[in-house]
Image (cartoon, grey):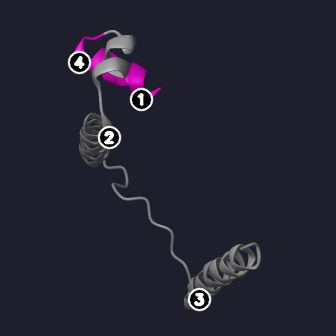
Amino acid sequence: MMVDAMAERYGQLPSTVLKDGNTLDLLVFDASSTYRRYLQNKAEGKPTVKTEDFSQDELKSMMEKRRNGRKNKQQTSSTHV
């Protein structure tokens, strides 16, 4: 979808965007699209930032899951050496 949107916005064929585009082009396009959406939402009085409020316990639980996942991955890779 992003390639199609970029091609339409810049007046290029999608194949040209794929051939000549790079990650910087994608980054700039994404940032400008997000900013346009922000401005549009602001003008329409819609929320401009999507936020998820997590409790302290939920955040701690997420961190522990992530840490445990890394430890398990490291242990698995070290036992296969």
Give the residue type at disc 2: Asp
How many marks are shown on the rendered structure?
4
Q: Is residue 2 left or right of residue 27?
A: right
Q: Secondary structure at mark 2?
A: helix
Q: Secondary structure at mark 3?
A: helix
The location of residue 38, given as percent across then percent down, is 29, 47
Along the polypeptide, which appears first: circle 2 or circle 4?
A: 4
Q: Which residues are magenta?
A: 1-12
Label 1 to label 2: alpha-carbon separation: 8 Å
* Residue 36, picture quadrant: top left
In-front residue for pair 4/58: 4
Q: Secondary structure at mark 4?
A: helix
Name the residue that disc number 2 marks: 30
* Residue 41, picture quadrant: top left
The location of residue 5, given as percent across then percent down, is 37, 23
Along the polypeptide, which appears first: circle 4 or circle 1?
A: 1
Label 1 to label 3: alpha-carbon separation: 35 Å
Name the residue that disc number 1 marks: 2
Labelled disc at residue 10: 4
Q: Are marks 3 and 2 in contact (CB under 8 Å)?
A: no
Along the polypeptide, which appears first: circle 1 or circle 2?
A: 1
